[in-house]
Each structure stands twice: as structure tokens, then as C-alpha cells.
Image: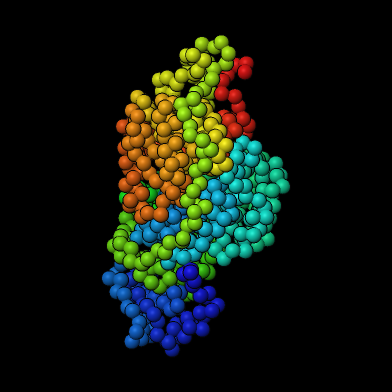
Amino acid sequence: MSHHIPTWAETAPRLVAVAAGRSPADLVVHNVRLVNVQSREVLDGWQVAVAAGRFAYVGPDASHCIGAATQVIDGQGRYLIPGLCDAHMHIESGMLTPAEFAAAVIPHGTTSMFTDPHEIANVLGLAGVRMMHDEALMQPVNIFTQMPSCAPSAPGLETTGYEISAEDVAEAMQWPGIIGLGEMMNFPGVINGDAQMLAEMAATMRAGKTVGGHFASPDKGVPFHAYAAGGAADDHEGTAESDAIARVRQGMRSMMRLGSAWYDVESQITAVTERGLDPRNFILCTDDCMAGTLVNEGHMNRVVRHAIACGCDPVIALQMATINTATHFGLERELGSIAPGRRADMILTSDLVTLPIEHVIARGQTVAIDGKITVDCPHYDWPATARQTVHLGKVLDAQDFAVKAPEGANAVTAKVIGVVENQAPTKALTFELPVTEGRVQATGEVCQIALVERHRGTGGVTNGFVSGFGYTGRMAIASTVAHDSHHMIVVGTDRDMMAAAANRLGAVGGGITVWKDGAEIALVRLPIAGLMSDRPAAEVASDADAMVAAMADCGCTLHNAYMQHSLLALVVIPELRISDLGLVDVTAFKLTPLFEGPQ
């Protein structure tokens, strides 16, 4: 089943009849101040009439559209704004299925999402993408799927559960809910003319769809120009004003993100607020939002409020979360504005600055009132293949997490991943670590990190070191959410605890577990692909809160430390990461030994 919405072409005869006054509308909303994002105006007293889930009439007086059965909503003088659009996001980051993600964000006014399910693609391949796509199409709001482009995100530096091929991309371009290609993270591949990356982009462009970008390098010289020439149409990896400017000057859209751990709007929106660049090429998005953020703070409404707080004109901020997004994906005549023929996605709010989301309408149907959802978000029947994805191959023990020292050494200079608070990049650090009985010991601020292979049951464990979390005592934390290949990451101060944590996730089919002094003190169950729960966001958020508290119990002081944990294997963001193949120097894009000096 899917919430199919008839096309404008199919409904035009009825829309014309309603607008002309020959046929009654399904819904009329009056007594509002209509925010027109096409003309950047606020129109007092305008009214809208809706038929077949689309706007039929938008103008000063819709009384001629009202019949005996027409539902009439009095806006009480409030603002009527378009439903909000998230231009770039990963549903899996909320640890929720598409249905439960939709249920969490609809009360916040999000009515359109452009989602890249590359997390599940790494675990289940094209089949997993199809499951996400199918559940997305069942929802009462618009969830468009971008076909993931990079699984693995860094070929040769990691092994994924599945690899996405150019043939997979070409096939997916025919699916009804596919809007384009997910972020092209393998920017070195594009710059160096990698045949597969260019073939994936070509298949997308031939299908008339949008290629998503991801250029995570500060080098805006020749490599950036080469990347832009490849076809990426947008980029959300900018962190400074100069990044945003460079992208729009190349005809790309600058996507500025505010997620649970991304704070990249304030530093870039000055390109519009101070430099005066054309705001229509700037777009707001979240990228990654945890369930707790969705439950407690909001979704795109939070991003728009933040943009306004950073000095952006409220109507311009709304454009960046509505029509700019729709235009970018070739959907300007389908959604993103309150105009004839568009999907009737709209929000009543009493204030454009604080943006309370008081009444949400999607496709002409009331979907939320005062923060409470009023519709059903149907669930897909996830098969056993999607629920049994943690394959360790053996029961792990402390020896699997032992780091052998070079022969005869009583100390080593180890390369250590340095976590930086609130930032995705890590630092490549070195520490002198002691050796006892031939094993390197993590001491002080340095913990052990291990990547445990979980897709093919190889029993493989890659060991290394990490600093910055502040863990003390005997503890371990393990997670099957480990961007992007989603093996299992275990961080700990105690090898027995690390083994116990890893085995526990093997037993429950994935999630996050925290162990301290021989016992489990928190567990977030993520049975679908080891990435998502099919329970409601509030329940998942509650479990995640307990997990964060457990991390603090173990001495962790970092803000959003779990996000950092889950990114430690993200081998496309500098400087140092870990993969199933070893330690990765991302700056040089190659594997690097764990110890300095002769190996």
C-alpha cells in the first residue's frame, strides 16, 4: 500500500472547477496571513481552497469554493506557511524506521524529507534500500529516497556488508520514490575520474534526477572545481562562510545543516545575511538527528528558528526550508509553496520568529495539532533478513582485544584517534603507551578501540587507541551503528568488558550497550539492520538518554559523545579512523600502521 497522491495533471480538471467556483473544495482555510515564498511576501487575509490533496485556489477570497461538505478552518489571524522540507537527512540516524521517524517529525511541521538510506545500504545493499523506500511511500507525508552512491564510502579502506554498483543505481532510478543519487562521498574518486562513481552520476543524470554532493575537504582549489565538474548539485559539508560562497559560485546549492551534532548554519548563513548573496541557492537541512533531538527540540522547525536567531529574515529562512529545497530537486511545481496545483502541505503558526507549530496539514489532511500527531504512520513488515544482521562468527573473549607490542618493546609510540568535541573530524595524535607481558596498555586519557566485523562472521577484530572520551574505571561501550560500513565499534578501558559488550550485541541483534564493572548498565535495542528500532521515537529516545547517562557514569564528559563514537570508523572524514582493514589515515586516504617507527 502507499499513500498515492494523484498528479496535478490528473487532478487539474477538478482544481480548475473548484478555483472557478463550479465545484466545492474539500477544505478551505481562511482568516490567515499567508506567507508567499515565491514572491517573499506576507499576504494578509488571503485564503486557500484544497481539492484532491492539492491547492486549487490561493487568493484574497475563497468563499466561492465552499460547498455543503467543505471543511472550513478559521486560521484566527495566524500565519499560514508551507510545510517544511528537510533537504538532506538520514532516517537511520534517528535510530527509527521511516514510519516512526515520520510520526516523530510530523508534529514539528516537516511534510517533505529527502532521505539517503546509505546506512542500511552498507548492511543490506539494494534490498535494504528498497525496504526503506517502500515504507517511506506508505507514509501520509512526502518521503523521497536518494539512492545511496557510496557503499563502501572508501573502496579499499573498508569492507561493507554489500557494495552498491552502478547497475544498482540505474535500477533504483526507475523506482517511484527515488529522487536522485545520495551524497557522493567518494570525492577523491570523482576528482580522479573513477569510472564507477562517474557511471553512477551519469545514470542519475540520464534519469533526470539530482546528484547529491559531499566534498569534505577544505581545499577549494583545483580538486573542488574538478568535483563540481562531475555533477554534484549540492553540498552539506561546508562549515565556513567561504565554503557556502564557493559552492553557490559553482552553481551548487549550499546546504547548511543543524543536526544533533552539526552546527554549520551560523558560520555560513552570513553569506546571505552579511555578504548579501542570493538566498535562493541556500538550503537548510538536518543531515543527522537523534531521536532525543526530535522528541525534545524539533526537526526542521528547530533549524528555521536557529537560522532566524542567526539574523536571517524569517521569510527567507522559510524559503530555505521550503521552496528552495523543492526547486533543487525539480519539485517546485509539486511542493514547497502555497500555490495552485502543489500538494496541500501547510502549517498554521502564531509567530514567524519563534515558529510554534500549531496545526499541520499534509496533502489537505490534518496530520497534527498542537504537537500531537492525528494520523497513522503505517509500518512495513520487516523480514527476518533485516532483523538478523549481527554475525560475529564466534564468541569473542578478552584476547581478541589484546594489542600485541613489537618484539622486545617495553613502550610504544602509538597513533591515537583524537576525538574533538562537537566536530566530525578527528585529530591524529601520538601517545607513549606502556607494554606489559608483550601487550600494549591504554593508560590515562587513552582508551582502546576495536572494530569488530559483523557482516560476514569473519571473527575479525581490528584494535587501536582513542582519546578524548574521558572514560575511567572498568568499562566498555559497543555499537553496531558505525558509519558508514556499520561493523561494530567497541571502546573501552577493560578487555573483558569489551568482549562482553560485543557478545551482547551479537545476542540481541544489534544496538548500543554500555558495560561497567562486569555488568550491563544500558542497552538500546536496534533490531533492524543493527541500526533502527521500530518502536516510537519517545521510547528510543528514553533508552538513548539512559545510554548517554551510562556513558557519563563511565567518566565521559563530551557533549554528544555517542555521535562521536558512531563516527570513529567514518573513513571519509579526516584525520584518523579505524576500519576492518586497519587504521586509516584519511588525509592521505591510505592504511597506516598503529605504531610509529620501524614495524
Quarter of the image where the C terminus is located: top right
Q: Position of residue 139 (x, y in %)?
A: 44, 64
Residue for point 43% across, 30% down: 498
Residue for point 66% across, 45% down: 190
Residue for point 49% across, 14% down: 437
Instruction: Farthest residue to the bottom: give it.
Output: 22
Task: Answer with the quarter of the image where residue 71 lies.
Answer: bottom left
Instruction: Farthest residue to the front: give it.
Output: 394
Q: Is residue 442 visible?
A: yes
Relative depth, front residue between 80 and 173: 173
Relative depth, front residue between 514 and 31: 514
Q: Position of residue 481 (x, y in %)?
A: 47, 42
Q: How many marks?
A: 0
Residue for point 35% across, 75% down: 29
Relative depth, front residue between 588 and 307: 588
Q: How is the image coloured?
A: rainbow
Asked whether, in this view, residue 480 is left or right of residue 301, the answer is right
Asked whether, in this view, residue 134 is left or right of residue 198, the answer is left
Residue 295 higher or lower than 398, as above or below: below
Q: Position of residue 220 (x, y in %)?
A: 60, 40
Q: Position of residue 148 (x, y in %)?
A: 58, 52
Relative depth, front residue between 585 and 434: 434
Q: Is residue 287 visible?
A: no
